[in-house]
Image (cartoon, rainbow, N blue to C red):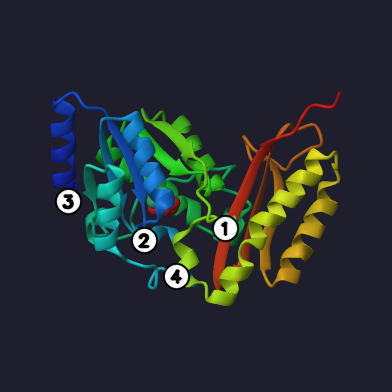
Amino acid sequence: MITVHSVRELRAAVAHARAEGRSIGFVPTMGNLHSGHAALVEKAGQRADFVVASIFVNPLQFGPSEDLATYPRTLVADQETLLVAGCHLLFAPSVAEMYPQGMDGQTRVSVPGVSEGLCGASRPGHFEGVATVVSKLFNMVQPDVAVFGQKDFQQLAVIRALVRDLNLPVQIIGEPTVRAADGLALSSRNGYLDEAQRAIAPTLYATLQQLAAAIDAGERDFAKLVKSGKSQLKKAGLRPDYLEIREADQLRPAGSDDRHLVILAAAYLGSTRLIDNLAFEVAAPH
Ligand code: PAF
């Protein structure tokens, strides 16, 4: 695996792979990689001949009071993870390389609809920052396929809408969330949790599972379910940001006739914000 830091080197390496007739798979990341990221890289390797990953902590998608400054930067360990997972080329640009004109004058990409509500409501500008950097990265790498984690369910919906609306010639693949044995979704931010918080954190997914089981058993009073889910999170010591039941394709608020549902949640443990979701099919009534 080689690591490049400039767009020029990236384009040259990708052009070389293309000239050899290889298809290009791409996994954009912000680094501090765990086995969830490794699974994305492995999937890209199954779907394309030449796998490119990027590591870039994108300032444009962080709010002023968020963890941009403290976000873990672990390039050497990440290079090892990527190598083992089958990555061929790592693009690790600086902020100046990504935003040579500065960020204020940077052309932005905003995706209406799916960017609104949920994380979009709690993190104003976040999805515009994501859509902008992913658009730039797609133009730089020009992949045939790109792989994203389903843990960031709303982000995946934003990327799919972006690709559809801008007619980008890239196939988007969503990979299932990788979890610890106790159910906690792997996340770069789990490292912020102390031991006591780490013990509480699996309650987030357990709560989603309980709500899904209740829906599966026939409960359709979503407001009641959300209320009980939030109180369960609070009881465990989590501070819910949102807990919502949505139709899984467009992320519209779920109606009782919807069959493909997703329960999405964000909650704080101390100052660490965790997100998770659970998508499932509801059986049609007999
Ligand atoms: O999911 C992430 O790590 C980031 O939001 C992404 C897609 C790499 C864009 O910065």
**Cα distance in 3D space between marks 3 and 2:** 18 Å
Q: Are marks 1 and 3 in contact (CB under 8 Å)?
A: no
Q: Is residue 179 left or right of residue 205?
A: left
Q: Are marks 4 and 3 in contact (CB under 8 Å)?
A: no
- Give the mark, 2 or 1, whose residue is nearer the N terminus: 2
Q: Is residue 113 left or right of residue 106?
A: right
- Give the mark, 4 or 1, whose residue is nearer the N terminus: 4
Percent position of residue 90, x then y? 23, 49
**Cα distance in 3D space between marks 1 and 3:** 33 Å
What residue is shown at x 13% (from left), y 39% (from top)? Answer: 12
**Cα distance in 3D space between marks 2 and 1:** 17 Å
Give the residue at mark 3: 4
- Give the mark, 1 or 3, whose residue is nearer the N terminus: 3
The local crowd at label 3, few if under 14, some if 14 to 19, many if 20 or more residues have their Cα within 10 Å, is some
Q: Are marks 3 and 2 in contact (CB under 8 Å)?
A: no
**Cα distance in 3D space between marks 4 and 2:** 14 Å
Give the residue at mark 1: 184
Task: Identify which amino acid the numbered label 2 is placed on.
Answer: Asn
Q: Is residue 270 visible?
A: no
Element class at badge 1 = loop
In front of the other: label 2 or label 1?
Answer: 1
The local crowd at label 2, few if under 14, some if 14 to 19, many if 20 or more residues have their Cα within 10 Å, is many
Q: Quadrant of residue 140?
A: top left
Q: Is residue 196 visible?
A: yes
Mark 3 sits near ligand 1, with its Cβ under 8 Å away: no
Task: Identify which amino acid the numbered label 1 is placed on.
Answer: Leu
What residue is shown at x 63% (from left), y 53% (from top)? Answer: 118
Tell me, for residue 32, which label it has, or none. 2
